[in-house]
Amino acid sequence: MSVISTRKDGDVLVVTSNNPPVNALGQAVRAGLAAAMAEAAADDAIKAVVITCEGRTFFAGADITEFGKPPVGPSLPEVIDAIEASPKPVVAAIHGTALGGGLEVALGCHYRIAAASAKLGLPEVKLGILPGAGGTQRLPRVVGVEAALPMIVKGDPIPAAAAERIGLVDKLVADDGLAESGVEFARSVIGAASHPVSSARTDKLDTSLGDAFFDEFRKTELRRLKGFEAPEACIQAVRAAIELPFAEGVKKERELFGKLVSGTQSRALRHVFFAERAASKIDDIPADTPVLPIAKVGILGAGTMGGGIAMNFLTAGIPVTILEREQAALDRGVAIIRKNYERSAARGKFTAEQVEQCMARLTPTLEMTDLADCDLVIEAVFENMEVKKEVFTKLDAIVKPGAILASNTSYLNIDEMAAVTKRPEAVLGLHFFSPANVMRLLEIVRAARTAPAVLKTAMALSKKIGKVAVVSGVCHGFIGNRMLSPRQQAANAMLMQGITPWAIDDALTDFGMPMGPFQMSDLAGLDLGWDKDSSKGETIRDVLCERDRRGQKTGKGFYDYDENRRRTPSAEVEAIIAGFVAKSGQAAQSFSSEEIRNRLLFPMVKEGAKILAEGMAQRASDIDTVWINGYGWPAYTGGPMFWADTIGLDVVVEGLKAFGHEVSPYLADKAAKGERFNG
Ligand code: T1G
């Protein structure tokens, strides 16, 4: 059965794609569209064409799984050129998300109508490429450069209403009866003397835009895209739309596309795309495992984590009861939640009405019994096992049977918490990352007795609250924090070899991490868990804290900070470190930035390999997803495991040995066989 079907509605040919799940423009779809256009051309009774899609969305782009494989015709540009060249008007009827090649198909059509709930965008830059089927040349011609540039460089889709405002969509229609609306619109233009041809349009092209405009755009928009190659290529392609005739602009687009698509960054970002989707799959639970209803959530602790966690559910429309021990702490927590919503509303993320609706779903309480009828209760209390066990014991006695009990612990053993309850099958970890209402990552910690339905419910819920969830087994620090420890140890070891904190931090920020280990320590506070009374200046941290260098909060830590919290290297810290190196009797070393980076990251990969060998993560790409969404690992390198694959596991193993690390048989074997973590 062809994925493309056609039917005549009077003198209009309705061309429908049915290629679930997202009508990706794979070879069969392209061939079907080309055949449909030929059918329309050959039939004089046909006066117009409507292109529409079945299922949840209009074409969501080229089929990314075809990348890197030998191309099979017709190519997407050929199909789009055929649509655009049709003397009979072609109308795109859009619902769901018209993305990438899907929007390029629509731009090849003479008219576009869209369901009000639809979204339109060119997200190729998020895959490390750029629109490669004429989008960088047609979109500026249809909506102007000022509107087209951010859509292409940032890749964020826009709602149909905004698309109509900029002239990308000719008419907004109801969600239902889209094909009929398409036929009606097509009939309304059949008699027109001519039809708009995107590639031929110049009315919206402001040819006066030059260096100043593009440089200003670079200054404001590329700062957050540091390290990514595709955004600059997108700018050059859009600039070609102003400076070159269409055919030459398309040639330029193709050159830029060709370079990017075969590059490491795009391969890494495509890996990240599929990794995030794979993470939601739990290999060993039956597909028919039920998802339990979660209509009400309880949160223990209204501190920073508890408040942020609550916001996820409130925003998703789920009522939350939040518990604290004292009224003052409860009031403070609720006030911070409101302040966070109002701050987001000020940035246009919520309307004032939506803020009130979210706050109305929140019930503050001092009574644990008010959590009795919750379907899920998440504790975010002090990170201490005895406290956790006490909380789980109480909750187990109060909360209705069948409800899920979860811990937001960052490190502690969930099995131990489950063991103090009579419902270990309903206990798991839900490890959010701070700020919990912002960070996309959620580590779902599967305890030894967690039931499949509880696990599946947690995964489904994570999607509902907009999180990227990854399943971790029970081990100290789960996936993310467990791999963070060897990096911190390596950083501390290099300090004792005379490498400065700023050389170490710079090696990581140059690699693309948001910050290095010593900046992070200064942000968190060096005196976390430090005891003034027992401190004897035995470690660098002891001495720093004794000298009131406790981090950003005291204006100095490993760095000195100015009133704007800008950091500068500290001569005092350098001297303190030099003193420790001299006392250790070790000779001060000097490492290149690359060696510093490898000394920090190779041990993380080693730990990742252990996590895989122990089955604490289902797949290597899950580890990549954790580090990209929870720790700011640069997505354009694909995550720690994909990065290791890119540089070669043999190189990692040799490096680890050179740095004095033992290498597990699992990792050594993979390297010896020339294998990769990600198949
Ligand atoms: N190609 C292949 N598979 C795709 C796909 C695509 N473009 N988009 C989604 N899938 C798969 C996905 O892996 C998953 O599979 C299933 O569909 C459901 O996806 C020439 C070159 C459309 C907003 O970047 O953003 O066009 O895990 O879980 O949350 O210029 O998918 O079930 O096996 O994400 O409802 C540009 C990518 C391509 C859009 C739906 N297009 N897709 O989100 O479902 S490059 C994109 C999305 C291009 C041209 C260039 C989202 C979605 P599985 P899902 P969702």
Image (cartoon, rainbow, N blue to C red):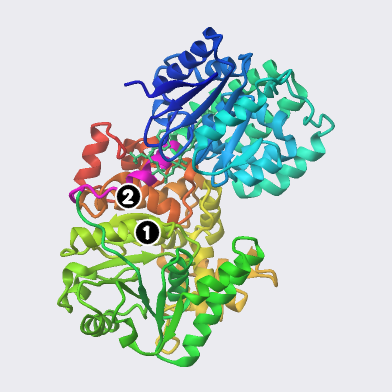
Mark 2 neighbour class, 10 Å CA radius: few under 14, some 14 to 19, many 20 or more: some
Residue 255 sits in quarter: top right
Say which residue label 2 marks: 280
At horizontal 47% and vertical 92% (from top left) the residue drawn is 327
Of callouts 1 and 2, the N-terminal one: 2
- As helix, strand or loop, the secondary structure at mark 2 comes to loop
At horizontal 52% and vertical 13% (from top left) the residue drawn is 40
Q: Is residue 92 visible?
A: no
Q: Using the image, determine if residue 310 lies above or below residue 653.
A: below
Number of marks in picture: 2
Q: Is residue 215 left or right of residue 122?
A: right
Provide the residue span drawn in magenta. 270-287
The image quadrant in which ligand 1 is located: top left
> Which amino acid, by three-letter code, is at mark 2?
Ser
**Label 1 vs label 2: CA separation?**
9 Å
Say which residue label 1 marks: 462
Mark 1 residue CB less than 8 A from any atom of ligand 1 = no
Q: Is residue 63 visible?
A: yes
Q: Are marks 1 and 2 in contact (CB under 8 Å)?
A: yes
